[in-house]
Each structure stands twice: as structure tokens, then as C-alpha cells.
Amino acid sequence: MTGIPPETAPARGNLPPLSLHVPEPKFRPGDKVDYSHVVVPPAGAQPRPDEGCPAADTQPLCFDLIRVLGEDDRAVGPWNPGLDADTLRRMLRMMALTRAFDDRMYRGQRQGKTSFYMKCTGEEATSIAPAMALAADDMVFPSYRQQGILLTRGYPMVDMVNQIYSNRADKLKGRQLPIMYSAREQSFFSISGNLATQYPQAVGWAMASAIKGDTRIAAAWLGEGSTAEGDFHSALTFATVYNAPVIFNVVNNQWAISSFSGFAGAERTTFAARAIGYGIAGLRVDGNDPLAVWAATRWAADRARANGGPTLIEHFTYRAEGHSTSDDPGQYRSAQEREEWPLGDPIMRLKRHLIALGEWSTEQHEAMDRELMDEVKAATREAEKNGVLGHGLHHPFKTMFEDVFEELPWHLQEQSEQAIRERRIKWPEWKES
């Protein structure tokens, strides 16, 4: 028997009734936006501890916001990585290419060429700057908005489009949802639609790298909503215990599909602060400042490579578009949010910085945009020769039963033959290639 008998229960008549708190976003459709609650500190005001410092020394940075680009578009402060103009131009180009690619693929989905697409508009810096700060062979465990990593690492754009269209040239043979890439040569782990699964996988890989005495580290990404998943906490526990050389990137873009970040705990504290409870280093960075993101990633990578252990980086940014092509953000958030986001647009900020340095111009930027649009268009047309969704140009039917077993079990062999027979009866003109 549990509980207290009613006759012996203490009187609580003088206590207020319990109430449940349900998080609510500050703005809904039609509301006026007020970002006064978002504290944006001056650029360059955040201290940069040594990479080998005790994790506790980073605790203030879990509540601050590391920024490099100031209001005058100049790079300032101890986190300024001092990148040369060629590197900055390449970073700008990769972000602009990713945006052009997203726009083209979004249009393709609307034209029925694929079933699904997810853009990373406004978040390009959170994948491209880290990709440039990491070593080219460091293993990355992405979520579904890190297409910029593949482009930065030189993965063929045609192959990306083939995967999105699930056509006969799709290297994954139509077995993954569109945009869920896998690229071994680029050290790019297969994207999973199951939230947060990549975190423990990244930790396991990093632990294996340490066991082998390798020098490669791991980096993983997820959205802030996924920090509420158990896999997130399991990963941090293992990383803490075994001092795994891994970087945990939490992309806080304010929205998890239609649920705002409060449902994952943003009303209580920052997401970077979760590092404190695990005793690992934590950084909170302006996710729309490409230089700050690069600097934070390189700091964490140097720390991991020197056996300093894991680092959690919260990228404070904004999801400018819908969650996916299946989502209409106008149904749950104010239309003014994107325009009034106080941290601006990462591409425009880097563009203005290069112009301020005398290393870029509006004319050069316009010419680059036209060139990138043509590049994406050419890749798309090349991929469309291999087919688009629902047009019959796909991998042979028999491949459904391949690539799992070294020798196909008898019962699957039976199913394969039966399926082929039935298909030939239904479509006599069909031939298995």
C-alpha cells in the first residue's frame, strides 16, 4: 500500500493548487515581433581561454555569445581568427552556393521532381564554417541541414541531386529519404531521420579513434529540439566518462518543426549550459557570424586533438524558412520574425566584411551569384538525365534485395523471384535491367 491515508494526510488548505507550465512562443502569426529579450553583446567582448584550460573556465561562455563581426563589419576581439581574404572569399562562395542549391532543389520539389526537401537558409555558417575549420578527414555526423559540409568538401553536386531525385544514378539506390546523404570519401556519416542518433554514433567513432591512437576527431550536429532526446544525454555521458575527442554542435535555430525552443528547455537556460552539468567545455556562439563559428570550431578541434576532451557548441541562429517543404511556418510564427532577427544573415554579414576590407564588391557578389546559379542549374540538368521522381528511371527492382547479406537467404531469394514474376504479369512490357 502506498500513499498516506486520508485521515492522516496533512491539511493543505492554505497552499495554492499546483499548476503546469506549458511553454508558449513570444510571437504568433499576426503578432508584432519584439526581440528585446535577445541579448546581443558587443563583438569582441568575450574572452578566449586557452584550448587546454579546465572545462570550468568555459562556464561564463556558456551564457555569453561569442561574436567577432561588429556593427561596422570589422573583425575584432580575441576570437578573431585572422583568416586571409582568399579563405574568406571561399567561405562566402560555399555559403552562397549552398543557398543557390537549396533554392533550386526547393523549386524542383514544387515541380514534382522529388517528394521532399529541407533548406538551411540562414544557417549556412553553422555547417560551412565548421567544415573549413576541421581537418578534411575529420569524421562528421550531420543532421539534415548540413548539406553545406558536402559542398565544402567537394562532393559532386550531381550526386547530391541524384540522391534527392532517387533516380537510377542515386548511389544510395533510393533507400534514403531525399537529402539524407552518405559519403564515405568525404568522411560524412549517413544522415538519419531519427533524431539525435548521430550523437552516440559520433562518440563511439571518436572513442575508437582514440583507442587506435589516430589523430582524427569527430563532430556531430543536431537541432536544439533534439537535445530533449535520450540519445543526446547518453552521448554526453559517454563522452564525459571517456574524454572522447568529439565536438557536439547544437544548432539553436529557435524552432523544432512547429515547436519553439522552449519545449527543449530554452526558457530555463542556454543549450550551451548543458555542458556544465557534464563537466565538459561549452561555448555559445553567434551562429550567423561565420568568423565566430570558425573560431569556436577550431578551438574545440584543437582541444579535442590535444586530448582535452569534448566540447559542446551552441550555435545561436534562426531558421529563416520552414522546417521542410511539408511545413508552412506562417501557421505558427510571426511573418516578421525573419526580417527582424537581430543577428542578421550570415552571407550578407560576410559579404559586408569583405567589402569593408576592400577585398570584395557588390558587383563581384552579383557576378558570383549568377555564376553559382548557372553551376547549380547545370548540375541539376545533368542529374535529371538519370530521371526524377516517379518517371521510371530508377535502380533495377532486384537491388531491393541487395547489399544486406553476403549471400541472399533462401526466403528473400523466393520473395525476389516472386515479386519479379508478379511484376512481369502486371506489366508484360517491363524488363528487369
Image: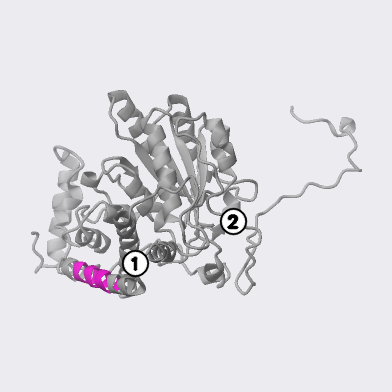
Rendered location of residue 64, percent (x, y): 58, 47
Write down the quadrant of residue 385 in the picture.
bottom left
Q: Residue at x 48, y 40 (%)?
A: 312
| Residue in view at x 55 percent, y 58 percent | 259
Which SS type dominates the magenta stretch?
helix
- Where disc 2 sits, the SS reads loop
Amino acid type of the residue tagged 2 in the rendering = Val
The residues colored magenta run 369-379
Where is residue 378? Give x, y as percent.
19, 70
Vertical side of 405 occupied by 45: above or below: below
Side (left or right) of 60 relative to 310? right
Find disc 1 in the rendering and name its residue.
360
Q: Is residue 198 visible?
A: no
In the displayed orientation, state which residue is furthest to the front: 358
* Residue type pointed to by label 1: Trp
Q: Sequence order check: which comes first, mark 1 or mark 2?
A: 2
Instruction: Determine whether, in the image, residue 412 is placed left or right of residue 357.
Output: left
Say which mark, if any, is on residue 16: none
The residue at which mark 2 appears reads as: 40
Quarter that holds the N terminus: top right
Contact? badges 1 and 2 (CB < 8 Å): no
Return the residue nearer the eye: 410 or 62.
62
Q: Residue 268 location in percent, x, y? A: 65, 46
- Figure check: 417 above or below 385: above
Q: Is residue 409 left or right of residue 354?
A: left
The part of the image, by quadrant, that contains residue 100 is bottom left
